[in-house]
Image: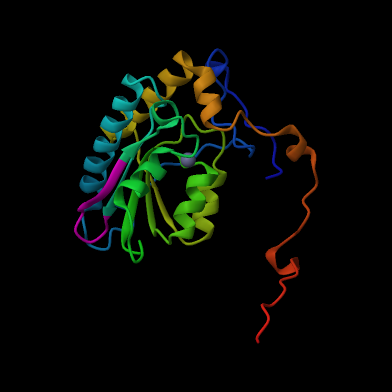
Amino acid sequence: MHGLPARQTASHAAAAPAVPSGGTAMSIVPSSPDARNGGIDRGERDERHLARALALARQGYDEGGCPIGAVLFELDTGAVLGEGHNGLVQEGNPILHGEMAALRSAGRMANRHRTTMVTTLQPCFMCAGAIAMFGIPRVVVGDTANAGSDETIRFLRARGVEVVVMDPATSAAAAGCIALGARARRERPELWLEDWGGGPNPALLEAPPRVDSWDSVPMPRPRED
Ligand SMILES: [Zn+2]
């Protein structure tokens, strides 16, 4: 990433910086909950799973941790495949974000091509990378207000992933996610920052990109004996 550091609004000045993912700060227009629903009322189902993810996030916060929860559910039936919350404090594990906890809970699967990942907070690049790698076609997000940039949403959408940003005006769960994230940034700013890797590395922000595209990377072929 070589964008500008995340910006803070005046109202956030006393709190921890928004998710410091290093991109430019942009507002994200919430999606309609039932956008591209394919005839299924996904709005109600998304709300129910987001409410469960929020309950897990609150549990994690009450345990002294970072308040981020996630649910992985089966796209066609709505059945929960896995769920969990951030485990940085509880397990001393910096890679156990909410989405990773849900993936761990779901365990082994031949593939995850008919699933939806529901997360209380906009995915970081680690989790967006896992979503992309596993071919998860759909992501539901409760809170983008406490993220510093929209770059992971753009990353996922550029790969064909449907990203539904729940609207706090119509989603009580989304409103709860935003309130909880704001509270954590206010009450545990150092923990919030640690969970996001301490903020952008200034050396990387200043470094020029080394490659312009994957096409420019030499790819040695394996030997055929
Ligand atoms: Zn993450």
Residue at 66 percent of width and 33 percent of height: 200
**In-image side of 6 versus 44 (left or right):** right
Is residue 108 located in the magenta-colored stretch of the structure?
no
Q: Tell which residue pokes out farthest to the front in this image.
A: 225
**In-image side of 175 versus 7 (left or right):** left
Please, which colouring scheme is shown? rainbow
- The residue segment tinted magenta is 74-83
Name the image quarter holding residue 120.
Answer: top left
Q: Can you say whether 179 is above or below 104 in the image? A: above
Name the image quarter holding residue 110.
Answer: bottom left
Residue at 21 percent of width and 45 percent of height: 44
**Residue 132 screen position, x and y as percent:** 48, 57
**In-image side of 209 versus 71 (left or right):** right
Q: Can you say whether 106 is above or below 68 in the image? A: below
**Residue 1 screen position, x and y as percent:** 67, 45
Residue at 27 percent of width and 63 percent of height: 38
Q: Nearer the viewer, residue 44 or 135?
A: 135
Please say whether residue 33 is visible from this viewpoint: no
Please say whether residue 64 is visible from this viewpoint: yes
**In-image side of 51 versus 143 (left or right):** left
**Residue 61 screen position, x and y as percent:** 35, 23
**Residue 18 screen position, x and y as percent:** 54, 27
